[in-house]
């Protein structure tokens, strides 16, 4: 992931004075999801689909030595409660859902994070200094590891604030009213469908809990 991030930033961010954050982070997060879950090493879906089909034919599913290091390999070798291999169609649906869900929410959060940092230069400066200190402790070319990420306390708080203020997805759902009730001046009858959105509730934006609207926690 470290090498992927370096290559992405060096090629698509650093050479330019301006960057379109959403499409760039979308490309990167989808590439990371593809690498982690199905061993994809390129941003193209069509060649990867052919690769999956070839791998499926090659494995034969009875080869105990098959490579099951990623999610795709494990699903190809997995079986249901009756001991039967999972259908190829179900595997495709599962993989597609995971790829879209993992990249979509991460992309939205990353884009919102960049936007909040641009709106709050003092927060950006603290995040930058935290990263700079960690970078100085590394040798030239040395990769960032999990221990380095755990040192980024202020950065993580900033991400948490981003999630609180801007949900990466719908962050809610629909429910059916089981009893008549009144909300403020509105009468809500039984049987109606109501929608709740978590990020717009008092738990996320309530003044009784938070005395600020947008700044990283110290």
Image (cartoon, grey):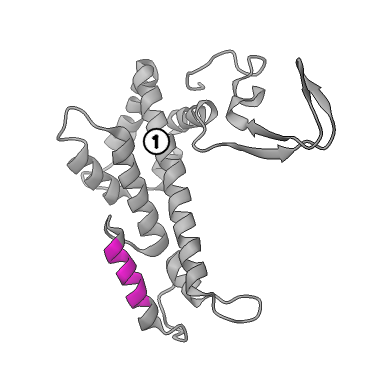
Residue at image mark 1: 110
Could you classify mark 1 by the number of other residues whose Cα lies within 10 Å: few (under 14), some (14-19), or many (20 or more)? Answer: many
Q: Residue at x 30, y 39 (%)?
A: 23
Residue 171: x %, y % from top left = 58, 36
Q: Could you say which quadrant of the image residue 108 lies in?
A: top left
Q: Residue at x 37, y 57 (%)?
A: 34
User: How many numbered tags mark residues here?
Assistant: 1
Q: Is residue 87 left or right of residue 190?
A: left
Which stretch did the figure color magenta?
A: 46-55
Residue 26: x %, y % from top left = 34, 43
Q: Residue at x 48, y 22 (%)?
A: 216
**Which sits in the foreground, 86 or 115?**
86
Q: Secondary structure at mark 1?
A: helix
Q: Is residue 176 left or right of residue 79?
A: right
Q: Is residue 183 above or below residue 61?
A: above
Q: Residue at x 24, y 31 (%)?
A: 19
Is residue 188 visible to us here? Answer: yes
Is residue 137 visible to us here? Answer: no
The dominant secondary structure in magenta is helix
**Which sits in the foreground, 50 or 153?**
50
């Amino acid at each position: 992931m470290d090498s992927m991030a370096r290559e992405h930033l060096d090629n698509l961010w650093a050479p330019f004075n301006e960057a379109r954050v959403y499409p760039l982070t979308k490309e990167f997060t989808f590439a990371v999801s593809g690498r982690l879950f199905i061993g994809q090493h390129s941003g193209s879906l069509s060649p990867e689909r052919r690769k999956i089909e070839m791998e499926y034919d090659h494995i034969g599913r009875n080869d105990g030595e098959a490579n099951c290091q990623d999610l795709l390999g494990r699903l190809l070798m997995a079986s249901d409660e009756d001991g039967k291999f999972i259908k190829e169609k179900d595997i495709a649906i599962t993989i597609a859902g995971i790829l879209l869900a993992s990249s979509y929410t991460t992309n939205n959060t990353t884009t919102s994070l960049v936007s909040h940092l641009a709106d709050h230069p003092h927060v950006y400066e603290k995040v930058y200094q935290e990263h700079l200190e960690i970078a100085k402790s590394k040798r030239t070319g040395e990769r960032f590891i999990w221990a380095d990420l755990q040192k980024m306390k202020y950065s993580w708080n900033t991400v948490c604030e981003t999630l609180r203020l801007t949900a990466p997805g719908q962050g809610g759902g629909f429910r059916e009213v089981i009893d008549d009730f009144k909300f403020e001046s509105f009468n809500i009858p039984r049987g109606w469908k109501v929608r709740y959105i978590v990020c717009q509730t008092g738990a996320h934006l309530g003044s009784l809990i938070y005395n600020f609207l947008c700044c990283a926690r110290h």
